[in-house]
Amino acid sequence: MITILTKNSPVLIPLLFLAFGLIIPLVAWKRNNWAWPAMMLASLTSVAIAVFNVFKVMEKGPVHYYMGNWMPPIGIEYVLDHLSAFVMLVINLIAFLVLMHAKKIVPLELTRREPPYYAAISLLLCGLNGIVITGDLFNLYVFLEISSLSLYGLIASGEKKSPVAAFRYLIMGTIAASFYLLGVGFLYITTGSLNMADVKAILPSIAGQPTVLIALALMVLGMGIKMALFPLHGWLPDAYTYAPSTSSAIIAPTAAKVAAYVLLRVLFFVFGVSFVTKTVPITNVIMWLAAIGIIYGSIMAIAQKELKRMLAYSSVAQVGYIGLGIGLANPWGLIGAVLHVLNHAFMKACLFLVAGNFRFKLGHSNIFKLEDSIRKKMPWTMAAFTAAALSMVGLPPLAGFFSKWYLALGTIKSASTNWTSWIFLVVILVSSLLNAVYFFRVLEKVYMKPMGKKPKDVHESHEKHEKEETIEIKSNEVGASMLIPTLIMAIGLIVIGLLNAIIVKGIIAFIIPAGMK
Amino acid sequence: MLDFILGHYAYWFTFALLVIGLYAMMMKKNLVKKLIGMTIFQVSIIIFYISSSVKWGGTVPIIEPGDMEKVHHGMAGAVEAAKYINPLPHTLMLTAIVVGVATTGVAFALVISIYKRYKTLNETELLKRMKKEDDNDSD
């Protein structure tokens, strides 16, 4: 039994979530409150399998799993290498923590019963894990659509405006997936194969053909929409803002990152490094768009009143960092990009959970309505927010600093051959300042006003004043089930920051594709 | 040049369908019209895959008895590929059709939900009202 499980561990996670997508509505048919424990069970198991997979890969190197024992290129191959094992662990860990937080807030924000909601989350995770693990281009499309369809449902189950946001995302998402499918079609026509490794082996002999170029352009365009690369980000702010708190906390750290992962896979592991950097320098285009996106997202974030919308625009900027790392196409840049997938997942999930805590206790997450009293009312939530905000800005012991550091190293390395790369270094530095502006705006509102002091000319009865203060100090923190995941994420940021050398040397260093210098 | 255009005429029709679908999705204001555009767009991709596997004079990919004997005599690869139509694009498109139906289903559910809440399906009007609600919220 155990050997069967360990042998099949690469496919277990997608299958597990697929099964639970069906099991959850059944067990919770009559009893709504059974849905959450069932979902937690699935999520906890997936984290265990993901950890097992990571150790398996670190010990034995990449594992190739042949679905139904059909050999590739005919059969569908699942590839568990350092990159996919790492991204899977990030997805499942974040999903587990967010789901832990979901118990109280989901019934509050949802207008209908919750079992279908958890079933949709389960299907979303099935799709995302499937995208990461598969080694087959068409299989990837199927998983992409599974995850997208559940995403639309998760976004639409929020407040009044959410279905409109979901519909607009559906239109854009369908265009993205269809472009990807069209690209796969062109690749299939020219190479006659759908297996990523096989296509990579065939491509060098026919790389100059226009169909290959069209395939590359279409696939990059499709994934650019999905990951919200700068001019294609239009769907993102509304979708993240109007979705229920749990949805945005689970979508923002995982879904867009997985699209970035697909972009990385397609560029470097299907088309190959020298093709995308020298023959058709599409990485340059990605790099420039990402740089514009970083600045644009940060500036738009400064202008927002609503915390969740601010975080959404900040996501546009942060995805830009990942795009920049991919576009640099050198080892430092790629390490920065992959490390940023982990860091940003923790930071953004933590921030969205904090926004959820605000909505749970205060009923809103409007920055201008936040009062200074919440630093006493919700001290732990605010502490987590501060940690995540400082990490976003990039203060050294926290995780956010290190991915930016690797990206900066990447730009410097790239600048030795091409002076325009200095511009990207400037972009990284300036965007850190802009990050500081939009996060300190919130921190200043909450922390910088002396507590309970009224203007000096109001010298009314001192006793009454004292009384008011004691009322204000009364703690109004969220319950443990919501507080613990938020704090774990905040502490996780420090831990990742301190352990970054181990993470990079132990696993990320192995992902550098062949031919990248 | 003329050969290039005439020789690929099936692809030009597919391309025209694709552009029509894309135009409707991006430019039409009515949400249902957008969905019609989406369906046209998806169908164009299905036709693209199917037309890529067309072979004049080809037949269904069930190996003929004569060919099978050659395989039995150890001449693997003796099956004449030119005789048979490649079945893989067709099977891929079966999946894509299912995905398309599911997407349309979800989209219609969203449209119903939007109509129940706003009593309109005009995108400009919807965005205007959403903006107004946002402003009311922040005051």
Image (cartoon, coloured by chain):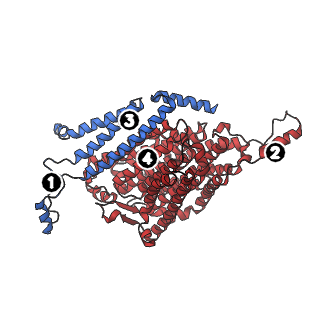
Among the two numbered marks 4 and 2 on one chain, the one whose residue lies closer to the N terminus: 4
Q: Give amino acid for label 2.
A: Thr
The disc label shown at residue B35, or none:
3
Residue A242's x, y, as percent? 54, 39
Q: CA distance from mark 1 to mark 3?
A: 39 Å
Evaluate whether residue A88 shows in this view. yes
Label 4 chain ID: A
Number of residues whose C-alpha sits closer than 10 Å to that of mark 1, classed few (under 14), some (14–19) or many (20 or more): few
* Local secondary structure at mark 3: helix
Residue receiving disc 2 = A470
- Label 4 sits on a secondary structure element that is helix
Contact (Cβ within 8 Å) of mark 1 with mark 3 = no
- The residue depicted at 67 percent of the width and 41 percent of the height is A362
Work out how far the residue at label 2 is from the one at label 1, CA to CA, in angstroms: 87 Å
| Chain in blue in the render | B
Chain coloured red: which letter?
A
Residue A148 is labelled as 4
- Tell me which corner region of the image, top left, top right, bottom left or bottom right, holds residue A218: top left
Task: Please give left or right for residue A230 compared with residue A365 in the image.
Answer: left
**Residue in the foreground of this view, choosing between A461 and A107:** A107
- Amino acid type assigned to the residue bearing label 4 in the image: Ser
Q: Is residue B115 above or below residue A177?
A: above
Instruction: Give the mark toward the camera: 1 or 3.
Output: 3
